[in-house]
Protein backbone atom coordinates (compact mmCIF):
# COMPACT_ATOMS: atom_id res chain seq x y z
CA UNK A 1 0.00 0.00 0.00
CA UNK A 2 1.38 3.41 -0.90
CA UNK A 3 1.99 5.99 1.74
CA UNK A 4 -0.24 9.07 2.04
CA UNK A 5 2.66 11.25 0.85
CA UNK A 6 3.11 9.19 -2.33
CA UNK A 7 -0.65 9.13 -2.82
CA UNK A 8 -0.74 12.93 -2.91
CA UNK A 9 1.81 12.93 -5.70
CA UNK A 10 0.00 10.47 -7.93
CA UNK A 11 -1.71 12.13 -10.93
CA UNK A 12 -4.90 10.10 -10.51
CA UNK A 13 -5.22 11.18 -6.87
CA UNK A 14 -4.69 14.84 -7.84
CA UNK A 15 -7.34 14.64 -10.54
CA UNK A 16 -9.80 12.90 -8.19
CA UNK A 17 -9.30 15.57 -5.53
CA UNK A 18 -9.74 18.33 -8.11
CA UNK A 19 -13.00 16.88 -9.45
CA UNK A 20 -14.26 16.15 -5.92
CA UNK A 21 -13.61 19.76 -4.91
CA UNK A 22 -15.81 20.98 -7.79
CA UNK A 23 -18.64 18.68 -6.70
CA UNK A 24 -18.38 19.82 -3.06
CA UNK A 25 -18.30 23.46 -4.17
CA UNK A 26 -21.49 23.02 -6.20
CA UNK A 27 -23.20 21.38 -3.21
CA UNK A 28 -21.91 23.99 -0.79
CA UNK A 29 -23.02 27.16 -2.62
CA UNK A 30 -26.81 26.77 -2.28
CA UNK A 31 -26.52 25.33 1.24
CA UNK A 32 -24.20 28.10 2.48
CA UNK A 33 -26.46 30.78 1.07
CA UNK A 34 -29.70 29.11 2.17
CA UNK A 35 -28.53 28.55 5.74
CA UNK A 36 -27.41 32.17 6.02
CA UNK A 37 -30.76 33.49 4.77
CA UNK A 38 -32.66 31.15 7.09
CA UNK A 39 -30.47 32.30 10.00
CA UNK A 40 -31.46 35.92 9.44
CA UNK A 41 -28.03 37.17 8.32
CA UNK A 42 -26.65 38.31 4.94
CA UNK A 43 -26.14 35.50 2.44
CA UNK A 44 -22.46 36.34 2.07
CA UNK A 45 -21.76 35.35 5.68
CA UNK A 46 -22.64 31.76 4.85
CA UNK A 47 -20.07 31.79 2.07
CA UNK A 48 -17.46 33.27 4.45
CA UNK A 49 -17.99 30.37 6.85
CA UNK A 50 -17.65 27.92 3.98
CA UNK A 51 -14.43 29.62 2.86
CA UNK A 52 -12.94 29.44 6.36
CA UNK A 53 -14.06 25.83 6.68
CA UNK A 54 -12.25 24.95 3.47
CA UNK A 55 -9.07 27.02 3.61
CA UNK A 56 -8.38 26.92 7.36
CA UNK A 57 -10.11 23.95 8.98
CA UNK A 58 -9.57 21.91 5.81
CA UNK A 59 -5.81 22.41 6.00
CA UNK A 60 -5.51 21.51 9.69
CA UNK A 61 -4.98 17.97 11.03
CA UNK A 62 -7.89 15.99 12.37
CA UNK A 63 -10.13 14.39 9.77
CA UNK A 64 -8.88 13.86 6.25
CA UNK A 65 -12.03 13.97 4.12
CA UNK A 66 -14.87 15.63 6.00
CA UNK A 67 -15.86 19.14 4.89
CA UNK A 68 -16.75 22.04 7.18
CA UNK A 69 -19.05 25.00 6.73
CA UNK A 70 -22.35 26.45 8.00
CA UNK A 71 -24.75 23.69 9.02
CA UNK A 72 -28.52 23.40 9.06
CA UNK A 73 -28.24 21.98 12.57
CA UNK A 74 -27.38 25.40 14.01
CA UNK A 75 -29.79 27.45 11.90
CA UNK A 76 -32.52 27.62 14.52
CA UNK A 77 -30.14 28.51 17.33
CA UNK A 78 -28.42 31.22 15.27
CA UNK A 79 -31.76 32.70 14.25
CA UNK A 80 -32.91 32.85 17.87
CA UNK A 81 -29.65 34.51 18.95
CA UNK A 82 -29.74 37.06 16.13
CA UNK A 83 -33.42 37.83 16.73
CA UNK A 84 -32.95 38.26 20.49
CA UNK A 85 -29.58 39.99 20.63
CA UNK A 86 -28.92 41.36 17.14
CA UNK A 87 -26.39 40.47 14.45
CA UNK A 88 -23.71 42.25 16.47
CA UNK A 89 -23.87 39.47 19.09
CA UNK A 90 -23.22 36.73 16.53
CA UNK A 91 -19.49 37.44 16.25
CA UNK A 92 -18.74 37.22 19.95
CA UNK A 93 -20.93 34.13 20.32
CA UNK A 94 -19.07 32.27 17.58
CA UNK A 95 -15.69 33.56 18.80
CA UNK A 96 -16.34 32.36 22.36
CA UNK A 97 -17.52 29.02 20.97
CA UNK A 98 -14.33 28.63 18.96
CA UNK A 99 -12.06 29.45 21.89
CA UNK A 100 -13.95 27.00 24.08
CA UNK A 101 -13.64 24.27 21.44
CA UNK A 102 -9.90 24.85 21.12
CA UNK A 103 -9.52 24.65 24.90
CA UNK A 104 -11.53 21.43 25.07
CA UNK A 105 -9.44 19.92 22.30
CA UNK A 106 -6.16 20.88 23.98
CA UNK A 107 -7.12 19.17 27.24
CA UNK A 108 -8.13 16.02 25.37
CA UNK A 109 -11.88 16.40 25.71
CA UNK A 110 -12.62 15.71 22.06
CA UNK A 111 -12.99 11.97 22.46
CA UNK A 112 -15.58 12.42 25.20
CA UNK A 113 -18.05 13.95 22.77
CA UNK A 114 -18.33 10.45 21.32
CA UNK A 115 -19.89 9.41 24.65
CA UNK A 116 -23.05 11.39 23.93
CA UNK A 117 -25.93 9.01 23.34
CA UNK A 118 -26.66 8.38 19.68
CA UNK A 119 -30.36 8.65 20.49
CA UNK A 120 -29.80 12.19 21.82
CA UNK A 121 -27.89 13.20 18.69
CA UNK A 122 -30.53 11.79 16.35
CA UNK A 123 -33.25 13.35 18.51
CA UNK A 124 -31.43 16.67 18.35
CA UNK A 125 -31.21 16.45 14.56
CA UNK A 126 -34.86 15.41 14.32
CA UNK A 127 -35.92 18.37 16.46
CA UNK A 128 -33.80 20.69 14.34
CA UNK A 129 -35.39 19.20 11.24
CA UNK A 130 -38.91 19.81 12.54
CA UNK A 131 -38.17 23.40 13.52
CA UNK A 132 -36.35 24.01 10.23
CA UNK A 133 -39.25 22.66 8.18
CA UNK A 134 -41.86 24.62 10.10
CA UNK A 135 -39.94 27.90 9.74
CA UNK A 136 -38.94 27.48 6.08
CA UNK A 137 -42.47 26.64 4.95
CA UNK A 138 -43.33 30.24 5.78
CA UNK A 139 -40.36 31.47 3.73
CA UNK A 140 -41.54 29.29 0.83
CA UNK A 141 -44.91 31.07 0.94
CA UNK A 142 -43.32 34.50 1.23
CA UNK A 143 -44.67 34.98 4.77
CA UNK A 144 -43.07 35.76 8.12
CA UNK A 145 -42.79 32.91 10.63
CA UNK A 146 -44.62 33.52 13.96
CA UNK A 147 -41.52 32.78 16.02
CA UNK A 148 -40.93 29.69 18.13
CA UNK A 149 -41.02 26.14 16.80
CA UNK A 150 -44.35 25.41 18.47
CA UNK A 151 -45.94 28.63 17.20
CA UNK A 152 -44.72 27.84 13.70
CA UNK A 153 -46.25 24.37 13.79
CA UNK A 154 -49.56 25.62 15.20
CA UNK A 155 -49.76 28.32 12.53
CA UNK A 156 -49.24 25.99 9.56
CA UNK A 157 -52.97 25.41 8.87
CA UNK A 158 -53.56 29.17 8.67
CA UNK A 159 -50.50 29.50 6.42
CA UNK A 160 -51.75 26.86 3.97
CA UNK A 161 -55.24 28.34 3.77
CA UNK A 162 -53.86 31.87 3.43
CA UNK A 163 -51.76 31.32 0.29
CA UNK A 164 -53.53 33.73 -2.04
CA UNK A 165 -52.36 36.31 -4.51
CA UNK A 166 -49.76 36.04 -7.23
CA UNK A 167 -46.64 36.59 -5.05
CA UNK A 168 -47.60 33.94 -2.47
CA UNK A 169 -48.71 31.40 -5.06
CA UNK A 170 -45.61 31.93 -7.21
CA UNK A 171 -43.29 31.69 -4.22
CA UNK A 172 -44.95 28.51 -2.97
CA UNK A 173 -44.80 26.94 -6.43
CA UNK A 174 -41.07 27.72 -6.70
CA UNK A 175 -40.34 26.17 -3.29
CA UNK A 176 -42.49 23.10 -3.96
CA UNK A 177 -40.87 22.69 -7.36
CA UNK A 178 -37.42 22.77 -5.75
CA UNK A 179 -38.43 19.99 -3.34
CA UNK A 180 -39.79 17.93 -6.23
CA UNK A 181 -36.53 18.34 -8.16
CA UNK A 182 -34.49 17.27 -5.13
CA UNK A 183 -36.63 14.15 -4.62
CA UNK A 184 -36.71 13.11 -8.27
CA UNK A 185 -33.17 14.04 -9.30
CA UNK A 186 -31.41 11.08 -7.66
CA UNK A 187 -33.98 8.67 -9.11
CA UNK A 188 -33.08 9.52 -12.68
CA UNK A 189 -31.14 6.83 -14.57
CA UNK A 190 -27.59 7.33 -15.75
CA UNK A 191 -24.56 8.99 -14.24
CA UNK A 192 -25.80 12.58 -14.39
CA UNK A 193 -27.48 12.60 -10.93
CA UNK A 194 -24.20 11.46 -9.40
CA UNK A 195 -22.16 14.11 -11.18
CA UNK A 196 -24.39 17.18 -10.73
CA UNK A 197 -25.67 17.94 -7.20
CA UNK A 198 -29.44 18.11 -6.75
CA UNK A 199 -29.46 21.43 -4.82
CA UNK A 200 -27.59 23.11 -7.67
CA UNK A 201 -30.09 21.79 -10.20
CA UNK A 202 -33.03 22.96 -8.07
CA UNK A 203 -31.59 26.44 -7.66
CA UNK A 204 -30.69 26.68 -11.35
CA UNK A 205 -34.13 25.56 -12.57
CA UNK A 206 -35.98 27.85 -10.16
CA UNK A 207 -33.81 30.87 -10.98
CA UNK A 208 -34.33 30.29 -14.70
CA UNK A 209 -38.11 29.90 -14.23
CA UNK A 210 -38.35 33.19 -12.32
CA UNK A 211 -36.35 34.99 -15.00
CA UNK A 212 -38.23 33.50 -17.97
CA UNK A 213 -41.75 33.93 -16.59
CA UNK A 214 -40.98 37.13 -14.66
CA UNK A 215 -42.54 35.74 -11.48
CA UNK A 216 -43.18 38.17 -8.60
CA UNK A 217 -41.05 36.44 -5.98
CA UNK A 218 -38.45 37.79 -3.56
CA UNK A 219 -34.78 37.21 -4.35
CA UNK A 220 -31.68 37.35 -2.17
CA UNK A 221 -30.42 40.78 -1.17
CA UNK A 222 -26.75 41.22 -2.07
CA UNK A 223 -24.55 43.43 0.09
CA UNK A 224 -21.10 42.43 -1.07
CA UNK A 225 -18.59 40.25 0.74
CA UNK A 226 -16.64 43.02 2.47
CA UNK A 227 -19.73 45.03 3.41
CA UNK A 228 -21.27 42.00 5.12
CA UNK A 229 -18.34 41.46 7.48
CA UNK A 230 -18.28 43.00 10.95
CA UNK A 231 -15.09 42.68 12.95
CA UNK A 232 -15.62 41.67 16.58
CA UNK A 233 -14.03 44.06 19.08
CA UNK A 234 -13.21 43.92 22.76
CA UNK A 235 -16.34 45.90 23.59
CA UNK A 236 -18.47 43.07 22.22
CA UNK A 237 -17.33 40.74 25.00
CA UNK A 238 -19.46 42.78 27.43
CA UNK A 239 -22.46 41.09 25.81
CA UNK A 240 -21.42 37.81 27.45
CA UNK A 241 -22.52 39.22 30.79
CA UNK A 242 -26.02 38.23 29.67
CA UNK A 243 -26.77 34.77 31.06
CA UNK A 244 -28.85 34.02 27.96
CA UNK A 245 -25.84 34.54 25.71
CA UNK A 246 -23.68 32.33 27.92
CA UNK A 247 -26.27 29.59 27.55
CA UNK A 248 -26.17 30.13 23.79
CA UNK A 249 -22.35 29.74 23.81
CA UNK A 250 -22.66 26.43 25.66
CA UNK A 251 -25.35 25.27 23.24
CA UNK A 252 -23.24 26.31 20.23
CA UNK A 253 -20.24 24.46 21.65
CA UNK A 254 -22.10 21.29 22.52
CA UNK A 255 -24.05 21.01 19.28
CA UNK A 256 -21.27 22.13 16.91
CA UNK A 257 -18.71 19.83 18.54
CA UNK A 258 -21.01 16.83 18.77
CA UNK A 259 -22.23 17.26 15.19
CA UNK A 260 -18.67 17.63 13.87
CA UNK A 261 -17.28 14.61 15.71
CA UNK A 262 -20.27 12.40 14.96
CA UNK A 263 -19.91 13.44 11.33
CA UNK A 264 -16.23 12.48 11.48
CA UNK A 265 -17.13 9.03 12.79
CA UNK A 266 -19.68 8.60 9.99
CA UNK A 267 -17.23 9.74 7.31
CA UNK A 268 -14.56 7.37 8.62
CA UNK A 269 -16.91 4.50 7.86
CA UNK A 270 -17.20 5.67 4.23
CA UNK A 271 -13.53 5.36 3.29
CA UNK A 272 -10.43 3.33 4.10
CA UNK A 273 -8.02 6.25 4.49
CA UNK A 274 -6.57 7.73 7.69
CA UNK A 275 -8.90 7.76 10.70
CA UNK A 276 -9.96 10.93 12.50
CA UNK A 277 -7.98 12.23 15.47
CA UNK A 278 -10.85 13.64 17.51
CA UNK A 279 -8.95 16.11 19.69
CA UNK A 280 -7.13 17.56 16.68
CA UNK A 281 -10.41 17.78 14.77
CA UNK A 282 -12.02 19.64 17.67
CA UNK A 283 -9.10 22.08 17.69
CA UNK A 284 -9.49 22.57 13.92
CA UNK A 285 -13.22 23.25 14.30
CA UNK A 286 -12.52 25.64 17.17
CA UNK A 287 -9.87 27.51 15.19
CA UNK A 288 -12.28 27.90 12.30
CA UNK A 289 -15.03 29.18 14.58
CA UNK A 290 -12.60 31.61 16.21
CA UNK A 291 -11.82 33.14 12.82
CA UNK A 292 -15.51 33.13 11.83
CA UNK A 293 -16.31 34.90 15.10
CA UNK A 294 -13.64 37.55 14.50
CA UNK A 295 -15.29 38.54 11.20
CA UNK A 296 -18.89 38.10 12.41
CA UNK A 297 -19.72 35.08 10.23
CA UNK A 298 -21.91 32.05 10.93
CA UNK A 299 -20.68 29.23 13.20
CA UNK A 300 -18.94 26.34 11.50
CA UNK A 301 -19.35 22.59 11.87
CA UNK A 302 -18.39 19.56 9.87
CA UNK A 303 -21.29 18.83 7.52
CA UNK A 304 -22.22 15.27 6.63
CA UNK A 305 -23.92 16.22 3.32
CA UNK A 306 -20.83 17.91 1.89
CA UNK A 307 -18.52 15.33 3.46
CA UNK A 308 -20.45 12.44 1.92
CA UNK A 309 -20.38 14.21 -1.45
CA UNK A 310 -16.61 14.59 -1.09
CA UNK A 311 -16.06 10.89 -0.40
CA UNK A 312 -18.51 9.73 -3.06
CA UNK A 313 -16.83 11.98 -5.64
CA UNK A 314 -13.58 10.06 -5.10
CA UNK A 315 -11.55 12.42 -2.91
CA UNK A 316 -8.33 10.91 -1.58
CA UNK A 317 -6.71 13.68 0.48
CA UNK A 318 -7.61 16.92 2.23
CA UNK A 319 -6.68 18.81 -0.96
CA UNK A 320 -10.28 18.48 -2.16
CA UNK A 321 -11.78 20.31 0.80
CA UNK A 322 -9.11 23.04 0.62
CA UNK A 323 -9.80 23.56 -3.08
CA UNK A 324 -13.54 23.77 -2.44
CA UNK A 325 -12.76 26.73 -0.16
CA UNK A 326 -10.77 28.32 -2.99
CA UNK A 327 -13.71 27.99 -5.39
CA UNK A 328 -16.07 29.51 -2.79
CA UNK A 329 -13.70 32.46 -2.35
CA UNK A 330 -13.45 33.05 -6.10
CA UNK A 331 -17.23 32.82 -6.47
CA UNK A 332 -17.89 35.27 -3.60
CA UNK A 333 -15.27 37.71 -4.89
CA UNK A 334 -15.96 37.55 -8.65
CA UNK A 335 -19.65 36.69 -9.01
CA UNK A 336 -21.55 38.17 -6.04
CA UNK A 337 -24.26 39.54 -8.32
CA UNK A 338 -25.31 35.97 -9.15
CA UNK A 339 -26.69 35.68 -5.61
CA UNK A 340 -29.18 38.45 -6.32
CA UNK A 341 -30.86 36.28 -8.95
CA UNK A 342 -31.64 33.39 -6.60
CA UNK A 343 -35.22 33.30 -5.26
CA UNK A 344 -35.57 33.03 -1.49
CA UNK A 345 -38.30 30.41 -1.93
CA UNK A 346 -36.00 27.93 -3.68
CA UNK A 347 -33.49 28.12 -0.84
CA UNK A 348 -36.35 27.59 1.60
CA UNK A 349 -37.36 24.51 -0.39
CA UNK A 350 -33.77 23.19 -0.27
CA UNK A 351 -33.74 23.62 3.52
CA UNK A 352 -37.17 21.99 3.92
CA UNK A 353 -35.78 18.98 2.08
CA UNK A 354 -32.61 19.07 4.21
CA UNK A 355 -34.72 19.29 7.37
CA UNK A 356 -36.81 16.29 6.33
CA UNK A 357 -33.64 14.23 5.86
CA UNK A 358 -32.69 14.97 9.47
CA UNK A 359 -35.79 13.15 10.75
CA UNK A 360 -35.08 9.38 11.01
CA UNK A 361 -38.58 8.26 10.02
CA UNK A 362 -37.55 4.89 8.54
CA UNK A 363 -35.19 4.07 11.43
CA UNK A 364 -37.66 4.87 14.19
CA UNK A 365 -39.87 1.78 13.84
CA UNK A 366 -37.05 -0.82 14.03
CA UNK A 367 -35.47 1.18 16.84
CA UNK A 368 -38.76 1.01 18.77
CA UNK A 369 -38.89 -2.76 18.30
CA UNK A 370 -35.29 -3.45 19.30
CA UNK A 371 -34.35 -0.61 21.69
CA UNK A 372 -37.52 0.97 23.00
CA UNK A 373 -35.73 3.11 25.57
CA UNK A 374 -33.51 4.65 22.88
CA UNK A 375 -36.57 5.46 20.77
CA UNK A 376 -38.21 7.20 23.73
CA UNK A 377 -35.10 9.32 24.32
CA UNK A 378 -34.96 10.23 20.62
CA UNK A 379 -38.60 11.31 20.40
CA UNK A 380 -38.51 13.13 23.75
CA UNK A 381 -35.41 15.09 22.73
CA UNK A 382 -36.96 16.11 19.41
CA UNK A 383 -40.26 17.19 21.01
CA UNK A 384 -38.45 19.10 23.77
CA UNK A 385 -36.51 21.08 21.17
CA UNK A 386 -39.73 21.94 19.34
CA UNK A 387 -41.61 22.88 22.53
CA UNK A 388 -38.77 24.76 24.28
CA UNK A 389 -35.44 25.53 22.66
CA UNK A 390 -32.34 23.75 21.41
CA UNK A 391 -30.28 23.95 24.59
CA UNK A 392 -33.08 22.85 26.91
CA UNK A 393 -34.07 20.01 24.60
CA UNK A 394 -30.53 18.64 24.34
CA UNK A 395 -30.02 18.84 28.11
CA UNK A 396 -33.30 17.03 28.66
CA UNK A 397 -32.29 14.35 26.18
CA UNK A 398 -28.91 13.84 27.85
CA UNK A 399 -30.61 13.64 31.25
CA UNK A 400 -33.07 11.04 29.99
CA UNK A 401 -30.26 9.02 28.42
CA UNK A 402 -28.34 9.04 31.71
CA UNK A 403 -31.42 7.97 33.68
CA UNK A 404 -32.18 5.23 31.15
CA UNK A 405 -28.63 3.92 31.35
CA UNK A 406 -28.66 4.08 35.15
CA UNK A 407 -31.94 2.15 35.21
CA UNK A 408 -30.65 -0.52 32.84
CA UNK A 409 -27.29 -0.95 34.61
CA UNK A 410 -28.91 -1.09 38.06
CA UNK A 411 -30.78 -4.28 37.29
CA UNK A 412 -31.17 -6.41 40.40
CA UNK A 413 -32.55 -9.90 40.78
CA UNK A 414 -34.23 -11.22 43.89
CA UNK A 415 -34.44 -14.99 44.40
CA UNK A 416 -36.73 -16.08 47.23
CA UNK A 417 -36.17 -19.54 48.75
CA UNK A 418 -38.93 -20.41 51.24
CA UNK A 419 -38.30 -23.31 53.62
CA UNK A 420 -39.94 -24.51 56.81
CA UNK A 421 -37.35 -22.98 59.12
CA UNK A 422 -36.33 -19.87 57.19
CA UNK A 423 -36.92 -17.74 54.07
CA UNK A 424 -33.77 -16.71 52.17
CA UNK A 425 -33.78 -13.74 49.79
CA UNK A 426 -30.67 -13.60 47.55
CA UNK A 427 -29.84 -10.36 45.73
CA UNK A 428 -27.66 -10.31 42.62
CA UNK A 429 -26.70 -7.54 40.22
CA UNK A 430 -26.59 -3.87 41.24
CA UNK A 431 -28.77 -2.63 44.09
CA UNK A 432 -29.33 1.12 43.71
CA UNK A 433 -31.98 3.59 44.81
CA UNK A 434 -33.73 3.11 41.46
CA UNK A 435 -34.60 -0.47 42.46
CA UNK A 436 -35.50 0.22 46.08
CA UNK A 437 -39.29 0.01 45.54
CA UNK A 438 -38.92 -3.48 44.04
CA UNK A 439 -36.58 -4.70 46.80
CA UNK A 440 -38.62 -3.33 49.69
CA UNK A 441 -41.94 -4.46 48.24
CA UNK A 442 -40.54 -7.98 47.94
CA UNK A 443 -39.21 -8.00 51.50
CA UNK A 444 -42.37 -6.56 53.02
CA UNK A 445 -44.53 -9.13 51.22
CA UNK A 446 -42.69 -12.10 52.76
CA UNK A 447 -44.42 -14.31 55.36
CA UNK A 448 -44.08 -13.05 58.93
CA UNK A 449 -44.09 -16.48 60.59
CA UNK A 450 -40.43 -17.40 60.04
CA UNK A 451 -36.96 -15.80 60.02
CA UNK A 452 -35.89 -13.97 56.85
CA UNK A 453 -32.27 -14.17 55.67
CA UNK A 454 -30.99 -11.56 53.23
CA UNK A 455 -28.03 -12.76 51.11
CA UNK A 456 -25.99 -9.84 49.73
CA UNK A 457 -22.95 -11.81 48.59
CA UNK A 458 -23.74 -11.80 44.86
CA UNK A 459 -24.26 -8.04 44.52
CA UNK A 460 -21.82 -6.21 42.25
CA UNK A 461 -22.78 -2.85 43.72
CA UNK A 462 -24.74 -1.64 46.74
CA UNK A 463 -25.20 2.12 46.91
CA UNK A 464 -25.62 4.15 50.09
CA UNK A 465 -29.37 4.69 49.68
CA UNK A 466 -30.04 1.00 49.21
CA UNK A 467 -27.81 -0.02 52.11
CA UNK A 468 -29.49 2.49 54.41
CA UNK A 469 -32.94 1.22 53.43
CA UNK A 470 -31.93 -2.42 53.98
CA UNK A 471 -30.45 -1.59 57.36
CA UNK A 472 -33.69 0.19 58.29
CA UNK A 473 -35.69 -2.85 57.19
CA UNK A 474 -33.43 -5.19 59.13
CA UNK A 475 -33.56 -3.06 62.28
CA UNK A 476 -37.31 -2.78 62.08
CA UNK A 477 -37.53 -6.54 61.62
CA UNK A 478 -34.99 -7.25 64.33
CA UNK A 479 -31.98 -8.12 62.14
CA UNK A 480 -28.75 -6.53 60.95
CA UNK A 481 -26.71 -6.09 57.76
CA UNK A 482 -22.94 -6.45 57.76
CA UNK A 483 -20.34 -6.03 55.01
CA UNK A 484 -17.63 -8.57 54.32
CA UNK A 485 -15.09 -7.49 51.66
CA UNK A 486 -14.09 -9.83 48.84
CA UNK A 487 -11.26 -12.20 49.62
CA UNK A 488 -7.87 -11.02 48.33
CA UNK A 489 -6.43 -14.48 47.79
CA UNK A 490 -8.72 -15.38 44.93
CA UNK A 491 -11.12 -17.36 47.09
CA UNK A 492 -14.83 -16.74 46.59
CA UNK A 493 -16.44 -14.12 48.79
CA UNK A 494 -18.28 -15.43 51.80
CA UNK A 495 -22.00 -14.89 51.69
CA UNK A 496 -23.50 -12.44 54.14
CA UNK A 497 -26.94 -13.17 55.54
CA UNK A 498 -28.89 -10.59 57.47
CA UNK A 499 -31.42 -12.63 59.42
CA UNK A 500 -34.58 -11.15 60.88
CA UNK A 501 -36.46 -13.28 63.39
CA UNK A 502 -40.28 -13.27 63.49
CA UNK A 503 -41.97 -11.39 66.29
CA UNK A 504 -41.85 -13.19 69.62
CA UNK A 505 -39.17 -15.71 68.64
CA UNK A 506 -36.16 -14.24 70.37
CA UNK A 507 -33.33 -11.98 69.29
CA UNK A 508 -32.19 -11.73 65.67
CA UNK A 509 -29.17 -13.62 64.46
CA UNK A 510 -26.55 -12.99 61.76
CA UNK A 511 -25.65 -16.06 59.73
CA UNK A 512 -22.92 -16.61 57.19
CA UNK A 513 -21.63 -19.21 54.80
Image: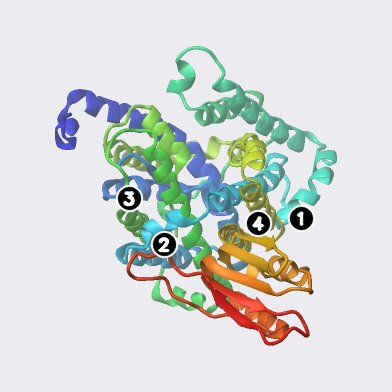
SS label for mark 1: helix
Q: Counting residues from the N terminus, which is met first, the one under dot 3 or under dot 1?
A: 3
Element class at badge 4: helix
The residue beneath circle 1 is 151
Please, is residue 214 above or below residue 135 in the view? above
Q: CA distance from mark 2 to mark 4?
A: 25 Å
For residue 72, side relative to residue 231 (left or right): right
Q: Which residue is mark 3?
A: 57
Mark 4 touching mark 1, by CB under 8 A? no
Mark in front: 1 vs 2? 1
Please give the residue where the numbered disc 4 appears in the rendered image: 385
Determine crowd level at label 4: few under 14, some 14-19, many 20+ residues with C-alpha closer than 10 A. Answer: many
- N-term mark: 2 or 3: 3
- Mark 2 highlights which residue? 293
Q: Is residue 431 visible?
A: yes
Q: Earlier in the sequence, mark 4 or mark 1?
A: 1
User: Residue 364 at what x, y percent from top left?
Assistant: 65, 40
| Residue 89 visible in the picture | no
Q: Nearer the viewer, residue 245 or 226?
A: 245
Identify which residue, 35 or 264, lies in the foreground: 264
Amino acid sequence: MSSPRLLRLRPDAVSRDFLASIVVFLVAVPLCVGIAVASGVPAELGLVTGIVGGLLAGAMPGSSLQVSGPAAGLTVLVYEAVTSHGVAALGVLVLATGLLQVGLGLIGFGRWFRAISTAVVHGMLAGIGLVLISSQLYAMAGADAPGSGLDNLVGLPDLLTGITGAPAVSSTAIGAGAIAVLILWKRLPGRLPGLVPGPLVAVGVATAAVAVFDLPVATIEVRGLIDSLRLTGLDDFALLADAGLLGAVLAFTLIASAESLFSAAAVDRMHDGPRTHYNKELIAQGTGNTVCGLVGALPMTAVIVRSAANVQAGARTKASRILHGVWLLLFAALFPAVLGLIPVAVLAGVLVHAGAKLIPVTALRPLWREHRGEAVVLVATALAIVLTDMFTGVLLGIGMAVVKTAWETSAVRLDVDERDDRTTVSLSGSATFLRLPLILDTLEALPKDRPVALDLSRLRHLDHACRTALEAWSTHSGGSVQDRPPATDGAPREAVLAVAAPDGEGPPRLAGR
